[in-house]
Amino acid sequence: ETARKGLFGMSEEEARTLGAIAMFCGISSILFGILYGTAFLMKTWEPIFVSPLHDIIGIIKVTLVFGMAQLILAMSINVINNLIIKDYTRAFLGSTGLIGIIYYISGALLVYNIVKAGYNFNVVFEGSNLILTYIVISAMMLVLLTGIVKGVVHRRKEEIMDSVVELLEMLIAYPANTLSYIRLAAFALAHEVFCTLVGIMGSILGFIPSLLLVNFIVLLIDGFAAGIQALRLTYYEFSTKFFKGEGIEFKPLLTVR
């Protein structure tokens, strides 16, 4: 029997799911409003966490750290998945395996030290940075050599090409994926700008009408922007580190009835 369709053609189960998502979005909005010191686009107290508009570098750092943590989590999931299916080569020597995590963390520390030294790239050959440089280079070579050995042993040229692609992803995709999270800082800044817009429009339309109008606009813009970018970061930057479309049946850890 076909389930009765309600709002926007959704079934009752789909409506409950949408309601749960909306509830968590509301909780998140309240939490970040408290951290930013704003409520309904009005500054109500001093920011507990950071004020994006007044500390642009600070909010960028926060988004980069969040992005790095999420990418490391994704690669850790990939290690666990490969251990479960007993693919130990990918678990330990794949570009998104354990060696990939070591490469990513070492590379991030190396970049941090370069920036800290005023973008002096010579620091990669000094002190502990030299060790990090060796780790980064060794990790890349290990991924490449692993693919070459597998290709020769299995007599499959595809595996050699796969290792080359993985090496390019380590060089290009990892930095690009990390920098993609800066978009979160951009949206935080845009939200703060709308807070100032309330005051500017208040002198034209009046405080209450401008407050209602700008809040409505922000609900639309933030809803679309946050939803689209969250999906992009989740499905591209995050999920591609461990998802494999190889026909393995999905078995959820918890079934919600």
Image (cartoon, grey):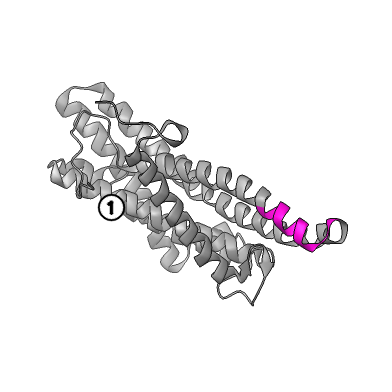
User: Would you place residue 184 above or below residue 148 in this image?
Assistant: below
- Return the residue found at the far left: 86
Please provide percent x and percent y for residue 103: 36, 52
Nearer to us in this view, 60 or 47: 47
Q: Viewer-proximal residue, 117 or 74?
A: 74
- Looking at the rendered image, the quarter that the N terminus falls into is top left
In this orientation, which residue lies closer to the viewer: 149 or 193? 193
Residue 49 in the image: x percent, y percent? 55, 72
> Horizontally, is 50 left or right of 130 in the view?
right
**Residue in the image at 39% along x and 51% along y:** 20
Q: In the picture provided, is 100 more to the left or to the right than 175?
A: left
Question: What residue does disc 1 label?
Answer: 76
Question: Horizontal placement of 80 versus 126: left or right?
Answer: left
Q: Give the residue drawn at x 27%, y 30%.
A: 245
Q: Which residues are magenta?
A: 205-215
Q: Looking at the image, is 110 positioned above or below residue 87?
A: below
Q: Is residue 240 visible?
A: no
Where in the figure is residue 140, as x and y percent of width and height? 35, 44
Residue 213 lies in the magenta stretch = yes
Q: Magenta region, mostly helix, strand or loop?
A: helix
Which of 35/157 is in front? 35
Residue 147 shows in the view: yes
Kindly identify the residue that appears in the image at 21 percent across and 44 percent down. 252
The image shows residue 46, relative to residue 89, as above or below, that is below
Circle 1: element type: helix
Kind of residue at badge 1: Ser
Q: Quadrant of residue 5?
A: top left
Q: Is residue 200 magenta?
A: no
Label 1 crowd bin: few (<14), some (14–19), many (20+), radius 10 Å: some
Q: Position of residue 121 (x, y in %)?
A: 56, 57
